Amino acid sequence: MSRKNLETQSGDNKVALGIAAGLMLAGFLFLAVLSFRPANNGEDVAAIFPISMTLEEITSSSYQLSFTPMRTGWTDNIVIFRPREGASLDELKSIGALVVVSAIMNGGCVFLTSDSNNKA
């Protein structure tokens, strides 16, 4: 093989390696998004609120919703809610939740609790 053929083959290998790495990353991100998405079967959800909201503001604003606050996550701006019949995740977003994820994906916030469990 000539030197030119080896350089072309090496360049093709780099392109193939880049495509393979990109596909692996895309697959990983797709599965990560699926695991964060809350289920529709009444499982607990973790709502992440802005740091500027206090736990008292969060629980008082969630009083009229179809969700029952259960406990906080690692910080006071992460609250675990249990949905009641007919609950919609949009309700939590309407009171300021930035993100609503499954509370039990890979242990999630269920096991990362803070000292604020009795504040609400």
Image (cartoon, rainbow, N blue to C red):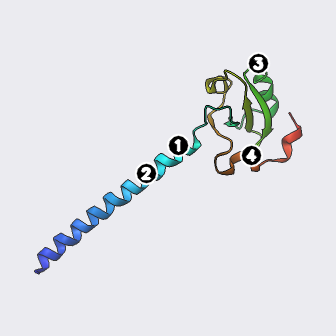
Q: CA distance from mark 2 to mark 3?
A: 39 Å
Residue hosting label 3: 64
User: Neighbour class for label 4 at 10 Å: few (<14), some, many (≥20)?
Assistant: many
Q: Are the two marked residues, 4 and 3, in contact with CB atoms closer than 8 angstroms? A: no
Say above or below: 47 vs 25. Answer: above
Q: Does dot 4 land on a helix, a strand or a loop?
A: helix
For label 2, the crowd category at 10 Å Cα-Cα, with few meaning under 14, some 14 to 19 and many 20 or more, is few
Q: Amino acid at mark 1?
A: Leu
Nearer-N-terminus badge (4/3): 3
In the image, what residue occupies the spot 81% across and 47% down? 114
Q: Which residue is the site of mark 1?
A: 34
Q: Is residue 95 left or right of residue 15?
A: right
Mark 4, residue position? 110
Residue at the extreme right of the image, as rendered: 118
Residue position marked by numbered label 2 in the rendering:
27
Residue at 53%, 48% in the rendered image: 32
Mark pair 4, 3: CA separation: 23 Å
- The amino acid sitting under disc 3 is Gln
Disc number lying in front (2 or 3): 2
Label 1 packing within 10 angstroms: few (<14), some (14-19), many (20+): few
What is the CA distance from the residue labelled 1 to the residue labelled 4? 18 Å
Q: CA distance from mark 1 to mark 3?
A: 29 Å
The image shows residue 3 at horizontal and vertical percentages of 13, 79
Q: Amino acid at mark 4?
A: Val
Which residue type carries mark 2?
Gly
Element under label 3?
A: loop
User: Is the residue under label 3 in contact with that under label 2 (CB below 8 Å)?
Assistant: no
- The answer for how far apart the CA atoms under marks 1 and 2 are is 11 Å
Q: Earlier in the sequence, mark 1 or mark 3?
A: 1
C-alpha distance separating marks 4 and 2: 26 Å
